[in-house]
Amino acid sequence: MRRTVFNEDHEAFRQTVREFVANEVAPYYPEWEQAGMVPRDLYKKLGELGVFGIEVPEEYGGAGESSFKFSAVISEECARAGVSFGGSSVHTALCLPYLLKYGTEEQLRRWMPGFVSGEMMTAIAMTEPGTGSDLAGMKTTAKLSEDGTHYVLNGAKTFITGGVQADRVLVCARTAPPTPEDRRSGISILVVDAHSEGYEVGRTLDKLGLKTSDTAELSFTDVKVPVEDLLGEEGKGFSYLAHNLPQERLGIAVGAYAQADAAVRFAQSYVTDRTVFGQTVASFQNTKFVLADCKADVDAMQAVVDRALDAHDAGELTAADAASAKLFTTELAAKVIDRCLQLHGGYGYMREYPIARLYADTRVTRIYGGTSEVMRSIVAKSMGL
């Protein structure tokens, strides 16, 4: 069926990204996986390509586009090649919406040039050891100094994507204790300079997948954060975080669909070339049936994702809609990719084959951005249950 979610501008951008991936990413990707992160100059190249400025208003050096579909194109093209742009998706899909919506004119003038160029990479630090999905249980504190000029930040964060190379980190911290009526109150967001005294990047976490996405533990010991770097209003951080969750979950849904679609193409190519018992693997009826089932599943995922992308661009994507899309695509993508890996036989277990990377990379989609269990709770609540 003809796909209508993207227009000519999106497709022109797709060709640009596809060429960039082929020339600047794919040839070096195995080396980057071994290093555990992409090189810093990749981010500068993405900045030159205009990737980081797509949704940034023109007055701050960006293209001023409002459509999230450009981000979807990047996800699809990276999955198609079995690669990623490291922690850059956090930079644009997670951090940017907070900065644009809650940043002051002065802050945007100060931060956006470096953000767009890739000279200033960002990350967001929410999760803490022992809290997981319970963000309201965070222990990191930011106390205002007596003279009111700065906050003193203390605490620790974990699972911070892009945390090793980030220059500024949106740190969620308690500027006031929770109240008995609302344990979510008192949380604020500080845009912390990663080069500040007392700011430390701990160990780089050794993950199952997403090997080029540097993920770190962070710690803060009496870090001084100027009050000018408070994002939005003090104490309203939790509501800010909730506001951006639908887009974050939509992005994960798009990625899961794209990975499943890529898995089917990788599997189809492999079974067409691979010969066993004197005939191609593709010639066996079981292979045909498995791939047919996978194709049907991918078509269903695409329909859900495209509808969600249209709804988001129209400002109509609800939290429940996004949760449903994420739940459906991530759970189904895992099944599709598993079946496609099985068709590769033993070679599917080797990381030199992209299907193995997809298998490992997609596992986290059912955890980050809200676990599948959390998504089910949101959807059930929207049903009045």
Image (cartoon, rainbow, N blue to C red):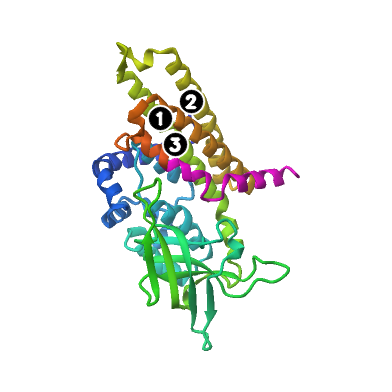
Using the image as rendered, state which of residue 360 and residue 111 is in the foreground: 360
Front in this rendered view, residue 221 or 38: 221
Under mark 2, the amino acid is: Cys
Q: Where is residue 133 in the image (x, y as percent from the top left)?
A: 57, 56
Distance from disc 1 to disc 2, alpha carbons, whole Å, reads: 12 Å
Please report the residue visible at 64 percent of the width from the left and 45 percent of the height from the top.
Answer: 320
Disc assigned to residue 341: 1
Label 2 element class: helix
Q: Is residue 257 visible?
A: yes
Q: What amino acid does circle 1 point to? A: Leu
Q: Name the residue under label 3.
A: 258
Q: Residue furthest bottom?
A: 147
- Circles 3 and 1: CB distance less than 8 Å? no
Q: Does the magenta stretch include residue 365?
A: yes
Of the numbered discs 3 and 1, the one sitting upstream in the chain is 3
Quadrant of the rendering where the C terminus is positioned: top right
Instruction: Identify the residue shown where x is 48% and y is 24%.
Output: 295
Rendering quarter of residue 12: top left
Dominant SS type (magenta): helix
Name which of mark 3 and mark 2 comes first in the sequence: 3
Is 41 on the left-hand or right-hand side of 120? left
Q: In which quarter of the image is residue 291?
A: top left
Tell me where the magenta segment starts and ends, as one range. 361-385
User: What residue is drawn where x is 61% and y is 75%?
Assistant: 176
The residue identified by callout 2 is 294
Q: What element carries label 1?
A: helix
Q: Whole-Å distance between the Cαs marked 3 and 2?
A: 13 Å
Decide: is 96 above or below 266: below
